[in-house]
Amino acid sequence: MTDEPLVSVRNLKKHYPITEGVLSRQVGAAKAVDGISFDIAEGETLGLVGESGCGKSTAASSIIRLEEATDGEVIFNGGGRAGRERNADGTHPNDVTKFDDEELKAFRRDAQMIFQDPSSSLDPRMTVGRSVAELLMVHGMTDKQRRREIVEDLLERVGLEADYYDRYPHEFSGGQKQRIALARALVLNPEFIVADEPVSALDVSIRAEILSLLNDIQEEFGLSMLFISHDMSVVREVCDRVAVMYLGEIVEIGDTDEVFSNPQHPYTEALLSAIPRPDPSDQRENIELKGTVPSPISPPSGCKFHTRCHMVIQSDEYDLEQEDWRALLTFRDKVRAGEIDPEGIREALSPPDADPSVVDDETVEDELRMEFELPETLADDDAEAIVDRALDALTDGEIETAEDELSTFTTPCEEEEPEETDHGNGHLSACLRNKPDTEHGAPLADD
Ligand SMILES: Nc1ncnc2c1ncn2[C@@H]1O[C@H](COP(=O)(O)OP(=O)(O)OP(=O)(O)O)[C@@H](O)[C@H]1O
């Protein structure tokens, strides 16, 4: 045993080319994973959490090399590779992204993946025992009886019965199939398992059982695990540490207890606030994450989370309630994106068969304020005057003027990319509010 991590991911990127036309000319890239770094120690489970579309599955398949990474390293120190130094040219002999066929074959034994849908790793025409045993055969175990014994033993260790060996996948429930998929992942005695949403397709009633099995197996086999989930409460059950991912980047990482009790990134805070709380006296604020994760083809500038962040930093020129500032920026962005249709609103508000012009501008403007959660009058006079002029321009059909007016509202979050802040004990976050000695001040919570 050494102190080096079993897995070290460094600045890993996976960009999918976006092509156009018959010549498939590349016109852009979807930056699904855009420079992530973390370590996983021997016997440790790291959770990778974030909403759908954050890049978790792409990260997983690039790490396990089901897909070729665009850039970065995945150093795997298992399989007898521990203690190796970098080569003279700076490359690492244990970099999975550069493994040749032979090294890759060995890596495929040492690192296994479990998927959300257990059926995907089971052939419906093959008995489950054979499905598991074939891996032993592929990796050179010729003794049929020995293979059967190993698989029967494994079936029992994942909570099934040895004589299930001869049954077919359709005879099992979802939870049982996930146990079989786990046996299949374990049969080659791997050191590293990547579990991509392993319980989210399962009935809520059996999720706890499978999570507890994963915990037991991980301990019994001394496995390192990358556990992917969109569900914070599931992550809390199984992970020693957690990495929070947003739009291809890791915005916060740390010990699970630390991240859950003292989140430092607004995105983490929002994800945590969505966990159902059975205790009604728990007064934590419920932070609604509006909209969906933006496209990685044209991600927002600066901090990628700024378009949805409830803590987005206010420009010094205004003094508004934080929620009004958020509402204002969302309104600005929607006007900019051409997603506001005042005439549609006028029409919707007019009585049936009446000419929409009976609905006056003020009513349309009030409706827009309501839709964007802008108060009747903003607390800051200057900001109010700008919004008022922008609304007038919108109802007059002068979209560009409205856009110009609203473009005076800016935030440092869209201009500056946040650097990592170290909160100690491996707890890192990337939010401008947490930058030491920053003029943006006010971190989320006191350390
Ligand atoms: N082959 C591809 N070509 C272009 N874009 C892709 C491709 N595969 C994934 N993406 C994009 O990359 C982003 C990340 O997708 P990914 O599936 O990794 O996210 P995720 O967090 O795992 O979400 P989910 O839980 O829904 O799978 C998404 O915006 C997705 O549309």
Image: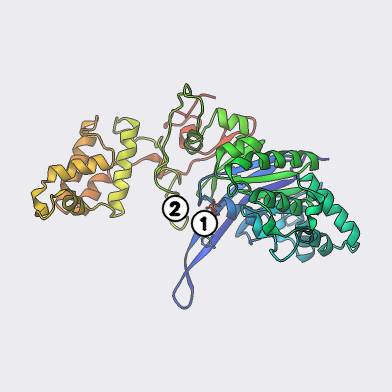
Rendering coords of residue 242 (x, y %): 61, 38
Marks 1/2 in contact by CB < 8 Å: the verdict is yes
From where the camera sits, is residue 42 visible?
no
Q: Is residue 266 left or right of residue 164?
A: left
Q: Determine which of the numbered discs, if any, sits on residue 177 in the image.
A: none
Q: Quadrant of the C terminus?
A: top right
Position of residue 405 relative to residue 275, above or below, is below
Position of residue 40 relative to residue 441, above or below, is below
Amino acid found under the numbered disc labelled 1: Lys
Which residue in the protein does label 1 denote?
31
Q: Is residue 314 left or right of residue 362?
A: right
From where the camera sits, is residue 428 visible?
yes
Q: Determine which of the numbered discs, if any, sits on residue 299 in the image.
A: 2
Rendering coords of residue 260 (x, y %): 56, 31
Position of residue 10 relative to residue 316, above or below, is below
Q: How is the image coloured?
A: rainbow
